[in-house]
Structure formats: C-alpha cells, structure tokens
Amino acid sequence: MPKKTIADLPDLTGKKVLVRVDFNVPMDEAGNISNDRRIVGALPTLRTLLDRGAALVVMSHLGQPDGDPTSSDFRSKNARLTMDRVAVRLGEKLGRPVTKLNDVVGLQVQHAADALKPGDVLLLENVRFHPGEKAKDKDFAQQLANLADVYVNDAFGTCHRSDASMVAVPAAFKAAGKPRVVGLLVAKELEILDGLLSAPKRPMVGLLGGAKVSDKVGFIKSLLSRVDKVLIGGAMTYLFLKAQGHKIGNSFCETKAKEGQKTPVQMAQEILELGKDKIILPVDHLAVTDIKAFDSAKVVDGEIPDGLAGVDIGPKTIALYRTEIAQAATVVWNGPMGKFEDEPYSQGTRSIANALSQAHAVTVVGGGETAEAVEEFGLAEKMTHVSTGGGAFLEYVEGTPFKALAEIDDR
C-alpha cells in the first residue's frame, strides 16, 4: 500500500475523525433500504476507529437529489434521500447510537462535532443537499475540515469523483497539517486491484457483460492487454455479433455515437481486431418474441432470426464459459450475462456466478449490477473479492488517476 491507512495513525484517544463513506444504498419506492452492503462494508473501519478511542463524524452522498439545494422546497422534494434511514440502519449494525444531523455544515453541525466524546457517532445530512459538494467549493470543504482532527476516505465507490468531500476536504486537512488516510475497505480494494494489474495468476479470464460497449471501451482495452481470454455476455453481445455481420433479430444493440466518438459498431470492430482470438462470443442465446412474454423464450443457435430478441446466453455458451472458468487461475467479472433481474432470464448470470463460486481461482467481481447479482444469489461470500465500486472499479482498471487518492498521505 503506497498510501497511509488507519493502521498508520498514532493514538486516536479523544480525536475526532471525519470519515467519508459510500452509503449510496439502493432504496425501494417507499424509501426503505433494499440492500445495506455498502453500510456493512464500512463497519470494519468505523469499529476500528471507535475501538481506538475516536469519535466519528460520518458523511456520504445518497442518490441524485433533484433541483437547487438552496431552494425552499428542495428538502421536501428529496425527502426520501435524507440520511434518516441510513442513520437507523448504521446504528443497528454498529450496536450503538448514531446521531443524525439535518445539515452538512453550519453552526449547529460545528457545535455537535465540538461536543463529541470518544465512542460517539455523528452522521451528517446527505452531502449533496449542500451546493458546495458538487461545486467543489473550498469554503464548504474548509467547514467540513474544521469538524475533525483526521480525514479517512473509505468510499472506494466514489473515489473516481472529484466532489468536495472527496478532494477539496482532504486538501483542506493537508493545509491544516492534519492526517489523511484510507480506511480498511479502500485499502483492500487497492490491494486486490493492484495485484490484478501487476501480477495476476494465470491463466487470467475476463467476463464482460452489460448493455453498452461505449461505457466500457477503456476498461475493455485495458483488460484485453492483461487477460488470456475474454468471455462476452449481456446485451453487448449483440453489438459484437452485428459488427461481425451476424443477424441479431430484434435484440438490443447500441447505435448512438457520442459527439466526437466512433459509432458503437466501429468501437466493437476495433475491440474485436485488438482482441482477436482472445475474445469468445456466445454460440447460442435465450431469445423471446416480447421481453414481457416469458413463455415465448426459446434457445436459438448461432444467429438470431427476425422477430426474436436475445435476453440471455444459452446452455451451450454456459457450458463453454464454465469450462473456461474452471481452467482459470484468475477471473475478473463485470456485467451480467443477461436480463438477470427477471427470473426467467437469469440462468446465464446465475450459472456463471455458481461457476465462480466453485472455481479454484482468484475471483474478483467488479461492483455494480454484477455485485448485486452475486449477492442476490447468495454467493458473494464465496468470491475472493466483490468490489464496492462500479464506475470506480472500471476506471481504476482502465488506469485513470484518482484525484481523491492523490490527496491521501503517502507512506
């Protein structure tokens, strides 16, 4: 680890620690937390700091609040995105009271922080409820820095962002001569990913799914330079098949090009040329006449005829991919193999997750929907590592420098 972690901090007795976590948890329509994986992921860091005598000021964003944070109706419009329910869940998981504030900064917040005693936990309001967060405002960052003696970044899922709480706040800590370290969750992410990028066990297999190739071009190219094989699934399958001149019926296929970029088909052709025989595409598909007509699903070999749309990889492809996984020493997986959120179309993703859980290999699941899938299937604990960052995972493997990590003290 080139960066300092909480293990490098001196005595914390009586110190106040500002911890940036990623509590951007999924919620149902009623605003109830539907998955608390991100809260659970931060517990080791929070408990370690508390056990060492610190008091905690915890901050996170939640969702994408709508409107101007300074408007009078902003809070009422975004009531479901307050940190109230997160505070309750965090208190349950920590087994101690968590005091939740209705502001991010201000006199009341400062007074509450000043009054903290060892073992106390304070949770600030959603940092995106303040305009200074997205504006990267230095005054806002300074007010947050005034709350504590130490800054801890334990929000890997947000490390690719340059919002105030991720960059300007630790910069303010540096200016004041205060320590800036990463927590246990971020340290583990970096250790696992750095190992993948520098010295992976071979053969190394990449599994790629999801809908859009354009969102993952840099990641795919980076992965191709490192792996021995890449197994393709998900809706991106149909773009690659189209790029090869195959029929894909009514399957989803990315078509729109962003300004100044190549078309998705051109991107796919470039990747196919770059990957050559490393890239393995599905040989059969589960296809339907209508996405909502589950009983219309049938297996199609080779090309997909008009009137049918692919929704998952087929049984021959599942068997082929399971064989490749069984022979691998390292497997990196990002993106579901099909429309797994609909049970009739989840077999491909479920089978691949099962194959990884049984593999004698280092298995790394790259956050986002893939992480949700392995958790839904009850297999997360059987993976070597399930990343807490979707976009952050992709960008780190791609080689994008993170300003948030640059602001952490070097060892």
Image (tube, rainbow, N blue to C red):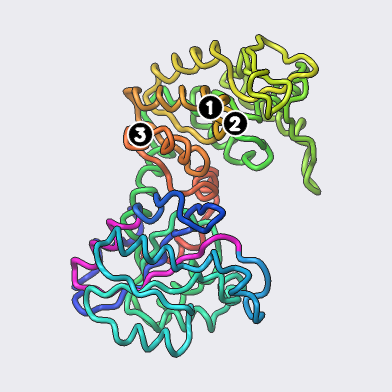
Q: Earlier in the sequence, mark 3 or mark 2?
A: 2
- Identified by mark 2, the residue type is Lys
Is residue 247 shown in magenta? no
Where is residue 42, by image quadrant?
bottom left
Asked which secondary structure carries label 2, the reply is loop
User: Which secondary structure, mark 1?
Assistant: loop
Q: How many marks can you see?
A: 3
Q: Is residue 352 left or right of residue 97?
A: right
Q: Position of residue 192 (x, y in %)?
A: 37, 42
Q: Residue at x 36, y 27 (%)?
A: 357
The C terminus - image quarter: bottom left
Residue at image point 32% right, 32% down: 382
For image coordinates 38% across by 82% down, the residue present is 147
- Residue pointed to by mark 1: 346
Amino acid at the residue labelled 1: Ser
Marks 1 & 2, CB-CB < 8 Å contact: yes
Boundaries of the magenta span:
42-64
Is 51 colored magenta in this rendering? yes
User: Reading the chain from its start, which is encountered first: label 1 or label 3?
Assistant: 1
Taking 229 as reference, is 262 above or below it?
below
Among the two numbered marks 1 and 2 on one chain, the one whose residue lies closer to the N terminus = 2
